[in-house]
Amino acid sequence: MSAAYSLFTAKEIKPRGWLARQLKLQAEGQGGQLDKFWPDVKDSMWIGGDREGWERVPYWLDGFVPLAYLLDDEDMKTRAKRYIDKILEFQRPDGWICPNGDVPIERYDHWAILLIAKILTVYYDCSGDERIPSCIYRIMKNLYELLSSERIRLFDWGKHRWFEGFIALNFLAKRYPDEAWIPALARLLKEQGTDYEAKAELWKTPMYQWTQDTHIVNLTMMLKSEAVSCELLGEEYTDLAERLERVLKKYNGTSFGGFTGDECLGGLSPIRGTELCSIVEQMYSYELLYAYTGDKKWAERLEKLAFNALPATISDDMWTHQYVQMSNQIACVPNHGRPPFGTNSTEAHVFGLEPHFGCCTANHGQGWPKLTVSSFMKAEDGIVSAVPIPSELKTEWRGVPVTVTLDTDYPFRHSFVYRVEATAKTDMALTIRIPSFAKNLTLNGHPVSAKEYLTVHGFEAGVSELRVHYDVTPKLVARPHRLYAAEYGSLLFALPIETEWVMKEYEKKGVERKFPYCDYRLMGHSDWNVAFCDRALTAEERPIGEIPFSAKTPAVVLKTNLCHIDWGFEKGYDTVCAEAPTCRKPQDEGKTRELIPYGGAKLRMTEIPLVRQGKSKKP
C-alpha cells in the first residue's frame, strides 16, 4: 500500500485569517524568540556553545523553521539558517553530527541522531538548500555503520523512538533508491526498537512509576510508526495505530482527544495531567496517518486536538505554557507536598518558561506550523482540503499553475469559501473532507448528499468559487465517572473560571524568568462546583477577535443550564477539585450560563455531571 496523499511544504502553503494571526502570535512569543534569551537554544552545543546539546535545538527548529517560511519572515529565516549552518559546519567527515562533548558515542542516546535528521528534512522542504540531502545521507549512513558493526545499539529514548528515523530514511529512499544500506538500516532500527504492541497490557493499569514503555510522548509519537515504516520495510499496513489507540483511549482517554500522561499514562481522571509535548507529537502522528491512509478519522481526531488541547495549554500571547494540562483545572499553583500527578513535580501545571522540564519549551512550537502545512494535501487526481483552516496553496497541476484559497472561520463557524484560480483549463479535482458531525451540507446554496468527501472535478481558466456550508448540533458526550462534556463540531467547551494571573520573576539554575518570559500562578475566583441541569445546549456566535482562542472574547459560546452541587476537593488539596463530585444533588434551581471553547479557558470545568435527565429547558 502506497501513501494516499503527499504533503505540500511551507513554500507552497500560507496561512490566512485567524490562522495567520495565530502564527504571528507564535512568532512574537516564546517559540519565535527562544534563540534570543533561553540558554539551551541561545548557547547550545549545537552551535558551539556550552549548553544542552541533545534534543532542544532540534525540537525548537522543528517548529521555528516552518513558522519562518509560512510567514515569509526574512529575519526568522536568517536566524534559522544560522543554526543550520553551524550544525552542518560541525558534522564530522564520517557523518557524525551530534555534539556529544565528552560523552562517548556508545553512551550518547541516539535519539538526537534520529531527531536532527528529521528536522533537516523539514529545513530542506522549506528552503531547498541543496547541502541538506548529502548531509542527511552521511548522518544516516554513519548510523548504519555504527549499528551494523555493533559498536552501538539503540537504548532508552532512541530505542523507544526508533520510527522517527524513518522520516529521514524515506527522504533518502526517494533520492537514492539503489542504496542497499537504507532498507538495511530500516530493518536494524525496527529490530532494535521497542515493540509497542507487546507493551499494550501495561497501559491498562497506570502506575505512579516512570517507565519508557508508558511514557506519553513515546506513545503519541509511536502512533505513526507503522505508517512511516511499512513501505521501506516491505511490510503490509495493518492499521496498528487504530488498535493501539483503542487501548490508550479506553484506559487513558481525555475529553480533548489526547491521553493522560504526567509524564506516564495516568488513567481516566479529569484531574490528571497531559504533557504538552504529547499533544504536538500526537498531532504530527495524525497528520502523517491521514496522509498515508486517507482515512478521515485521523484528520477529525487531529482537529479535536489542535483546536482544544493545543491552545488550552499555552497563554493567549504564547509567551508561556504548561508542562501538563488538566481537563478540570481550577487553579495552576504549586501544590504543597505530593503533586497530583504521576511522575511530575508540583509545578508542572503552572504557566511559565520551562515548568517542570524544558522539553516542551523547545518542542511545542511545531504544533501550529505543521497543522498549517497539513491544510491541503496532494492526491493522484488533484488537491484535498484535509483540515479546513484559512489558508492558501500555490502549486502546479500537470503544468498548469493553480492557486487554491480557503477563507473560513472554522472551527468557530461552518461556512467555507474556496477559490480556485487556474491559468488554463485543468482536470484537477478539489476534494473537500466532510466531518462526521456535519448536517445539511450545501454547495453554492444547493443541498448535496456527500457524506465523507465532496469532490469537484476540473476547473476552467480563471477563478472558480465554491461556497460550502453545513450545520452542526451541540451535544453532551458521556465521560468516565458519570460525567459529561459539551461539544460543538470539533470544539470542546468548558465553564471558564475567573482567573487572576500572578506574575513571578526569578532566576533558577542560571536561567532567568523575566517578563514576558516569566512564570505565572493562576488563581481562580469564581464558582466551579456545577452540574448540567439538562441536555439543552444553544450555540451563539460572537465576533472573532485578534486572539482566536481568547477567554475574554470567545468566538462562540454554548448556553446551557447549570446548577450548583457539592463537589469538594481532592483529598489533601485545596486547589484541585475532586476527581468526581462528593454529592450530585442540586443545591438550587440553576440558571443559564455560558460555556466557552476549551482552548480559551485556562481555568475551567470541562467534565461535569448531568443531574436531571428529564425534559430539557431551553437556555
Image (cartoon, helix red, strand yellow):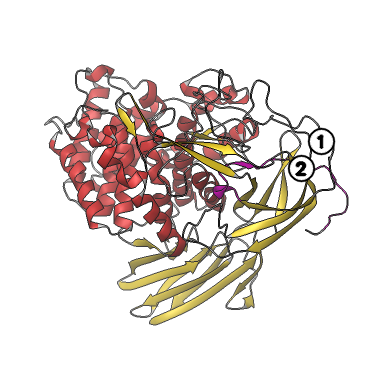
Q: What residue appears at the point 59 percent right and 27 percent down from the top-left corner?
A: 266
Which residue appears farthest toward the left when viewing the image? Answer: 93
Task: Characterize the magenta stretch by its predominant secondary structure.
Answer: loop
Measured as percent of width and height from the top left, residue 307 is found at 53, 51
Please state which of residues 573 and 273 is positioned toward the viewer in this rendering: 573
State the extent of the magenta-drawn residues as a range: 597-617
Bin the neighbour count of mark 2 within 10 Å (Cα to Cα): few under 14, some 14-19, many 20 and up.
many
Question: Mark 2 belongs to which amino acid?
Answer: Ala
Please state which of residues 584 and 263 is positioned toward the viewer in this rendering: 584
- Residue 589 located left or right of residue 253: right
Q: In the drawing, what numbered circle is on residue 404? A: none
Q: In the drawing, what numbered circle is on residue 531? A: 2
Q: Is residue 600 magenta?
A: yes
- Residue 247 located left or right of residue 616: left
Give the secondary structure at mark 1: loop
Callout 1 touching callout 2 (CB < 8 Å): yes
In this picture, is 43 found above or below 134?
Answer: above
> Which quadrant of the structure image shows residue 115?
top left
Question: Mark 1 belongs to which amino acid?
Answer: Arg
Q: Mark 1 points at which residue?
A: 584
Measured as percent of width and height from the top left, residue 206 is found at 60, 23
Mark-to-mark CA distance, 1 and 2: 8 Å
Please state which of residues 379 and 409 is positioned toward the viewer in this rendering: 409
Q: What residue appears at the point 40 percent right and 30 percent down from the top-left corner?
A: 161
Measured as percent of width and height from the top left, residue 5 is found at 43, 55
For the C terminus, the quadrant is: bottom right
Q: Is residue 532 magenta?
A: no
Q: What residue appears at the point 54 percent right and 74 percent down from the top-left corner?
A: 467
In this picture, is 506 found above or below 292?
Answer: above
Q: What residue appears at the point 62 percent right and 25 percent down from the top-left corner?
A: 204
